Every structure is written in C-alpha cells, then in structure tokens.
Image: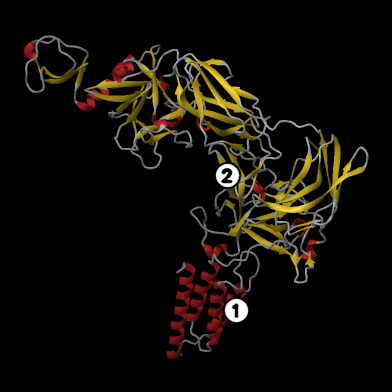
Amino acid sequence: MRKSTYLFSMIAAALLSVSTATARTSEDKAPAAVLERANQAEEVLNLRGVGYPTTESEAYTTFAAVIAEARAYENATTDYVAALETAETAYKSATEGIQMPEAGKYYNLVMMTQTGAQWLLSPSAEDVSLVAFDGTPSAATAFECRANADGTYSFLSPQNKWFRNHSKYAGVSWLSGCSVTGLDDTYNELYCNITVARMGKDDKTDAELDELFGYMTLFSCRGYDSGKSSYLSGYTIIKNDGSDYDGAGNLYYNASVTVAVRFVEVVPEDAGETAKNTFVYTEVSPENNSTVETLSKIRMTYPVLSESVDYEQSIAVINTATGETVTQGTLNWEDYWGGSTVITFTLDTAITAAGTYSITVPEGLIYDDQIIWNDDDTMDDSAATYNPEFTLTYTVTGTATPKNTFNYLSVSPENNSEVETLSVIRLTYSARSESIEYYEPIEVINTATSEKVTDANLYWEDYDGGSPVVTLTLDAEIITPGTYSITVPEGYIYDNQIIWNDDDTYDDSNATYNPEFTLTYTVTGPAVPPVASLDEFSNTIAYTIKNANGLGTIYYDEAHSGMMWLGASSNYNFSQDVDLTSKNANWLVILFNEQYYLYNAGAGQFVKVNAFAGSVNTSLQDEPIAITIQALGDYKFAFSTSGGTKDWMCASPQISGKPVCQWTVDDGGCAWRLTPNAELDVTAESAAAIEKIAKKTGIRSITSATPAASQAFTLDGRTVAGKLQRGLYIVNGQKVYVK
C-alpha cells in the first residue's frame, strides 16, 4: 500500500470513530466551529491549477469525503475540527495526482520564498530578470508551454526565446556552457527540456510538505562539469532578496535561497495574439548555405512531434543563377531523434550538377503536436503553431569527394618521432567524432619482427580548445627499445554528421570517416631503466612510481594530506604535471626484518592500501605498515597491505577526487613501474623510516656487527661467532636486525 493511500485510510477510520462518538454524546455540540473549519478546508480543496491535486486524484477524493462527512452531522463534536485539520495536512502533502503544466497554455513563473517575497521570472530580449510579483498575471512576461515526448516541458518567451537554467548573472566558474541569461535563441534539447515536478523535501529543504503546497520545481541541465566529466543538472534557484540567481542546484528552500516555483496561468485573451507561424526547426542537415557535393535529401529537426506534414504539395528546387526549376521535392515525417522529430525534404531527382540551388518551403506545411484531428479528418489548429515560410540554399560542387576524408589535425607524440616510452597517443580533430570503434582492438606491431606486442583501443577523451581529442591507449606501456607501428583501419572514427536511428542503425550519407593511417614510433627506452626484480630494491634509493599503462604517476600532494595523489594521467581529471625531482614524488622501498614498507620521502609517511569498500583512497599514515609487493614481470609490481582479493593499489583517474583506490591484481591500474632516482639523496629519510619501523617492531637495526662470540646469539639460543650475517639476533640482551 502506498504511503498516501495508507494515510488517507487512517483519516477515514478516524472520522468513523468520530461519527460513532457523535451518536453517543451530545454535550459538546459545536456545529458552528465545525462548519467554519469545513469552509476553510473547502477553500483549500477548490484551489486549481498547476501544483494542486486534480479533481480525479485520490487525494482530492479523500479530502472531499472528509469535508462532506463533517458537514453531514448537525451535532458534530469539535473532534471534527481536528479531523479536518489532519485531512487538510494530508491533502497539502500529497505528491501524486498533481496538476502539471499544459501544452499551449501560458504561465507566469513566480519564485516563492520562505521570507514571503515573490519574484517573477521576467523574460526580455536579453535575459530573465527577477521582478517583484504583485499577484497580477502578466501577458508580457508569460511563457508558452510546450510538452516534449520524454515527459519534460519547454517554455517559449514572448520574444521567441527558450527558457533554460540561469546559473548566475556572473556565471559559474566550474561549469562550461552555463547560461548567464536564462535564455537560448534556438531550441537545444539538452538545456531547454525542463523537468517540472511537485516541490519535494530533503535535508536542504527547511519546510514540511504541506507548507510547500502548490509549489513546483524546474530541473534541467546547468552545464558541463569538467571535474566530474559529465553534464550537471540542477534546480532553478534564486536568492530570497531577488538580487541574483544562485550557483547551487540542489533542493534548497530556506532563509536565504529557494527553488520553489508557482505557476500562474495567463488566460489566452490576456496573452494576446501570438503569431501562429512560429514552429521553426532547431537544426537542418546539411546546414543552410553550406557547400555539398550532391543534393538529394535534407533533414530538419523540430523540438516536438510534428503532428501534420503536407505530403502532397510539391516544392520547387530553383537554380538561383537561372531562376529555373531543376526538380521538385516533398516533405515527409521520418523519425524521432533524441526526443525530437525529423522532417525530411526529398528531391525527386538528386542534383549532381555544379551550381547554387534554393528551396522555399511555404508557410503552414508543418504543424506542431498541438493540432487536433477530428473524426471527419478535419483538424483543429486553434492551439497549434506551424512553420513560417523559409528558404534553404545550397552550393553543389558536383564533384565526388571520398568519404574517408576525416583526418586528424595533429597527433601527440608526433608521427615518426622518438619517444622514451609509448602508452597513450592523442589525435585532435576539427569536429566532434560522433562514432568511434570502441570494441575492436588495434594491434601494435614491432616492425623489426612483425610481431604484435600489445593492443591499442580508441576512446573519445575531451575537447581541447574547442576541438575533440581521440586517444589511442595501449593495453601495456612499451619501454623496450625498438620501432613500433599502429595501423588504424578505415572507418573507425566518424565526424559529427552521422545520424543515429532509434534501432541503433545509423545514416552516414552526409558523414565522413578516417582513412586508414599508420603511426610509427621509435622507442629509445627510459634513460634510467625501471626496477626489474625485488632483489634490485635498496633501502637508500628513491623511486618514482608510474602506472605501467599510462594512468598516471603517484605523489604526495600537500593539498590532499593523508592520501596518495595522481598526476600526469591519460585521464584529464588528473593530467597535472608531476615534478619527479621533488621528494613528494619519490618513494622508498624499505626492507626490514624480511618485510617491505612503502614510504613517501616528502610526507615522511607510510602507504596503506585500504580494504575495498567501493572506492576508498589509498592513504598515507605515520604508523609503519608492512606491504606485500608482487612482481608481475615486464618491470611491473603490485602493492597490497591487507591481502584481500580487491585490495591492490590501483590507479583510478576516472574517479574524480579518488585517484588511487584498490582493485584486483590483474587489473591494469594495479601494475606499477618503479624507476630509481639516484640523483636524490634520501639517506636521512631512509634512516627516519627505519627508526619508525624499529620502534614499532621493537627491533634495533644495525648495518653490520662483529661482537664477541659470547655476546651474539640466534633466537633459538645458539652462539654466533665472527661477523654477523643478515638476520635477527640477540646482541647484548637486545633484539638486533642486521641488514
């Protein structure tokens, strides 16, 4: 049983008990008080509009029954007053059966504050300002509501601009693409599709549900958060004094800020006459006024379902130089694309002759989804809009350009260059790649032997200065000297003119893709080879630690004390440079009493790989903790301090704020290469680390010892003569570890 159903059932039961009590007693008659409270309740019940329960809702039916029950008893006791109050609170707290905005209607959007101030979202040609609302509906500031196929709504201002989340007048520094006006000139599904919902409650809402009666919220995309590698959505939120929008996006309602919105309907006669020919496309492919090789089909994307298209009217295609009609075409409804409608214009005959051509689509051939069809096949377009007359113009070259012309602008490292090691290659393109072959690995070949040494995979990484970057990421970093080549097959990377259909097929008629290309690199090997085996480690040598698969270099960052940090990662979350000469980026591998310890020279702390609990940072601590080091071969090692299956230190640049976590030892993020840094003197740091370990274990360390035979014993009591070998002894009554 739903919570609301249960609550209303309890109210009904309470009233039944009140009715029974009325039949038994007549001393406390107070019909006037009951009727007065019932009248007050009925005023609440009769509130209509967006945000209030509909007359068909369970909440309305139950509350109405309670009011009727109270009015039916002439000798009702004052118990009915309490019952009505309980029922009203339940009604005001209802979250189901709420009236939503209606397409084709006009609304003033009013922000409601805890302080009592009301601020009208007032659109102009420039922005959506905050104006004190006096309770009078305003046609000049009313938004027209559009309903979208995905259940969201879009709102068109009187200036024919689209409402979207307003970040702040000054913008928000951590978001790209955010709006400082609250308006878009053209419809953009990502930003202009608004989720409208009944105002709810969470830990940032300083009010109960019944206090938020009639309030709604506007939830939409705010912009792109590069730190989280994702688009960020949130609520439209303002400061209570109306001075500005707020940079937060949560469900706030307190003494300072609010997300609560009341919809005030503006009746059509107050809205005035709006031009009917306002249904315009948001995108056209090929782009208007562009140059194409041939012309056969044009696709126009509309923000909502087009309910009517004139299939029969032929539209002329004109040679603009001669004024002659060269062919004709017709409109057709094609498909949904991303919640929008695609209308095509298909030419009867494809144009291949060079020249400039125009198509003028008359007004009223394409209607939005507010058209109503009658049984006799006539239509009611009183609430609908249709297209204005518009012209599309194209220059046809008449020359066939190969499809495999989508070439990268630059590559890093440069092709045919020398590199010390090879792990990640970045390809920069002029337009966003709309399709990448993620599933087929690409072989990396040793050109001298023609043998495959590893695989590489394509990934879409990021925009770099407005251009997208596609990476070739090797499964294993190459450090062995030699020449290596990577051949990317044709058709693995498409430009942004590819069109995806609902059935996961695509139309690439206007798209281009990569030609086959080969990248060749000569690997010289690192200047200082990494450690190959456990026997090579020394207590007095510092090491830099880098993930073997290009996921970054670990170091101690003062700004993130108590945890390991990651830099120089192939993931842009942690792509900052690392100073490999700094002690913060250098580590000691201490062997003491047959156990290893991993120690940061700059922090003076030991590494602890926490047990797996869903992305827990690998931490740094003062207390020594032994660490298991597993040699993986090919200069790679894995680290764990707990021994659990998922407790191996793992590079995780994909997790913002948690760059070094833990996972299984076979994961590429758990493979680390340690390179000696002999230039850095860490003698003092090594001694300090050993002292801390000795203090914890109760074992004193000496480099060598040659005590009198009578002074040195093994742990089982045997006397040792001569120079002591590596191990643990009793010397002069103390435990001593000889290195």
Write down the residue under mark 1: 39
Amino acid type at circle 1 is Asn
Q: Residue at x 64, y 51 (%)?
A: 241
The answer to whether 349 appears left or right of 408 in the picture is: right
- Would residue 305 be seen by someone viewing this image from the given angle? yes
- Specify the quadrant that holds the C terminus: top left
Nearest-to-viewer mark from 1 and 2:
2
Image quarter where the N terminus lies is: bottom left
Residue 158 position within the rendered picture, expressed as x and y whole percent measured from the top left: 77, 54
Q: Is residue 143 above or below residue 507?
A: below
The picture places residue 635, in percent across and down from the top left corner, at 38, 21
Task: Identify the residue position indicated by label 2 in the image.
Answer: 232
Query: Between marks 1 and 2, how big is the CA–CA gap?
Result: 46 Å
| Image: 508 above or below 255 | above
- For label 2, count other residues whose C-alpha is less than 10 Å away and answer few (under 14), some (14-19) or many (20+): some
Q: In the image, 83: left or right of 280? A: left
Q: Quadrant of residue 154?
A: bottom right
Percent of width and height locating residue 601 = 37, 21
Query: Closest to the observer: 560 or 435?
Result: 435
Q: Is residue 130 left or right of residue 547?
A: right
What SS does tag 2 mark? strand
Instruction: Give the residue type that dot 2 points to.
Output: Leu
Q: Pinpoint residue 692: horizontal percent, then vertical percent.
A: 27, 24
The residue located at (56%, 84%) in the rendering is 71
Residue 165, visible in the rendered structure: no
